[in-house]
Amino acid sequence: GFSATPEGRGDKSDLVTTAIFGPVRWRQPYSAAVGHKSVVPIEVRMYRVPSRAGVDTRRLKGPSIQSMVLIWRNSVRNRIVRDVVRSEIPDGEQALIMVESVEHALYLRRLLPEFTLVYRTMSPALRLRMLRLGLATQEDPLKVDIPRAQTAFREGRLRKVISTMVWSE
């Protein structure tokens, strides 16, 4: 899709696209695409998180350990997410927070208990570890019915969701 901009790309991917699919046959202005709802306008806000948030990064070996410590288990960063959700999303509005791991979703849910978790599966070992940390409950299922949750969200019956990337698959 190239974000609906196949021509004039700096990475020259437009040439590959043209070679594979042929020349552009139809153009639609952005305003018309919004009117037809084939493009949805979004608003992106960025928030500053303190660098390393007090973590000694010299001890962190490998990207998964870095993600675990600097993102999933980073209490400073997670509180910022909570505070932004509380201050920026009006009561009654729907909210979807997407994270990379069930573990991160569980850390955020501790701060945002009104949110529903959506994930593909939680291994029994992860569940036990999260139970011991007080992040999971006995009621949390090992597997979530993702299509049912997405339908409930689209219909407005499910208002607040923290989901792993399964939401977009």
Image (cartoon, helix red, strand yellow):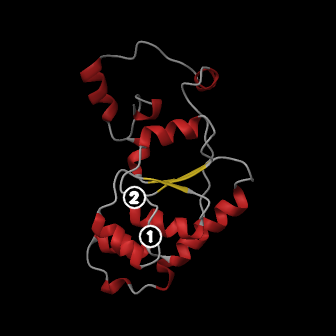
> At 45% from the left edge and 34% from the top edge, which residue is drawn?
3
Q: Dot 2: within a 10 Å radius of its alpha carbon, few (fewer than 14), some, or many (20 or more) residues? A: some
The residue closer to the viewer here, 140 or 61, is 140
* Amino acid type at image mark 1: Ile
Q: Looking at the picture, how far across and down is residue 85, in whole percent? A: 65, 60
Q: Quadrant of the N terminus?
A: top left
User: What's the CA distance linking mark 2 and mark 1?
Assistant: 10 Å
| Residue 147 in which image quadrant | top left
The residue closer to the viewer here, 37 or 101, is 101
Callout 2–callout 1 Cβ contact below 8 Å: yes
> At 31% from the left edge and 81% from the top edge, which residue is drawn?
60
Judge from the rendering whether residue 134 lies leftward or rightward of residue 47; answer left or right.
left
Q: For the view shown, which residue lies furthest in the front direction?
A: 138
* Amino acid type at image mark 2: Glu
Q: Looking at the picture, how far across and down is residue 36, in whole percent? A: 60, 20
Tag 1 secondary structure: helix
Residue identifier under label 2:
100
- 15, above or below 51, in the image: above
Mark yes or no: residue 50 visible: no
Badge number at residue 61: none
Badge number at residue 71: 1
Q: Looking at the picture, how far across and down is residue 90, in whole percent? A: 74, 53
